[in-house]
Amino acid sequence: MTNPGRPGWGDAWTVDDLQDLPEDDQVYEIFDGSLLVSPHADVFHGAVANRLRRILDRQAPAGLLVGQDIGVSAKRSSYFVPDLFVAHESALASGGAALDPADVLLVVEVISPSNAGRDLVLKRHEYAAAGIPLYWLVEPLKQTLTVLVNGSGGYREQAVLLGEVYRTEQPFPLALPLADIF
């Protein structure tokens, strides 16, 4: 039996279907037409993400946006909400339910023990397939930053950093003191 406005048995979820879900304490994502539901992150996870966002915001050049709480749609049947992203600010003018991955320069996931596999395997594969150039994995328990760069065959590990200042030119010139985010 089909419920109007929601997929019925056997129907794939799409980004458009998310509009009908309740505004509650859950994060709704879609992988290959299947709905994924996760609880919102805990306070420590949120603090790490917010500290990192502040550092990125201070150093981001005009025209780039460091954001949260906006999804990225790799294709109509997959949609993820990264903990942080860097995108061309002009991408927001188009509106819509999600960012196009062509406008996203970096996605960042803060690893939670409850759904680490989703970030380490599933999202890593999907973000790479969507062509997003950079993927950072922040592991609060280990206090590390893993920098992944997209190339032929998917992401490759460029660096795993612990307690140092990460200096890079991508997605913009940046000096990131890791001790300031944990």
Image (cartoon, rainbow, N blue to C red):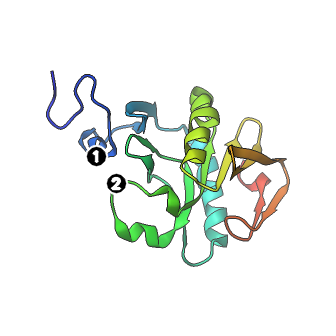
* Residue 175 in view: yes
Q: Residue at x 77, y 53 (%)?
A: 178
* Residue 67 in view: no
Numbered mark located on residue 16 in the image: 1
Going by the image, does 20 lie left or right of 142? left
Relative height, residue 24 to residue 57 (above, below): above
Numbered mark located on residue 40 in the image: none
| Three-letter code, disc 2 | Ala
Q: Residue furthest front?
A: 152
Q: Position of residue 147 (x, y in %)?
A: 74, 50
Q: Residue furthest bottom?
A: 62
The quarter of the rendered structure image containing the N terminus is top left
Q: Are marks 1 and 2 in contact (CB under 8 Å)?
A: yes
Where residue 116 sits, quadrant-wise, is: top right
Q: Residue at x 75, y 68 (%)?
A: 169
Q: How many marks?
A: 2
Name the secondary structure under disc 1: helix
User: Dot 1, how many residues are within 10 Å of its Cα: few (below 14), some (14-19), or many (20+)?
Assistant: few
Name the secondary structure under disc 2: loop
Q: Position of residue 15 (x, y in %)?
A: 34, 45
Q: Residue at x 22, y 27 (%)?
A: 8
Where residue 156 sits, quadrant-wise, is: top right
- Identify which residue, 32 or 136, lies in the foreground: 32
User: Dot 2, how many residues are within 10 Å of its Cα: few (below 14), some (14-19), or many (20+)?
Assistant: some
Q: Position of residue 127 (x, y in %)?
A: 57, 46
Q: Position of residue 157 (x, y in %)?
A: 77, 45
| Three-letter code, disc 1 | Asp
Which mark sits nearer the N-terminus, 1 or 2? 1
- Identify which residue, 110 or 106, lies in the foreground: 106
Q: Residue at x 16, y 29 (%)?
A: 3
Q: CA distance from mark 1 to mark 2?
A: 7 Å
- Residue picked out by circle 2: 97
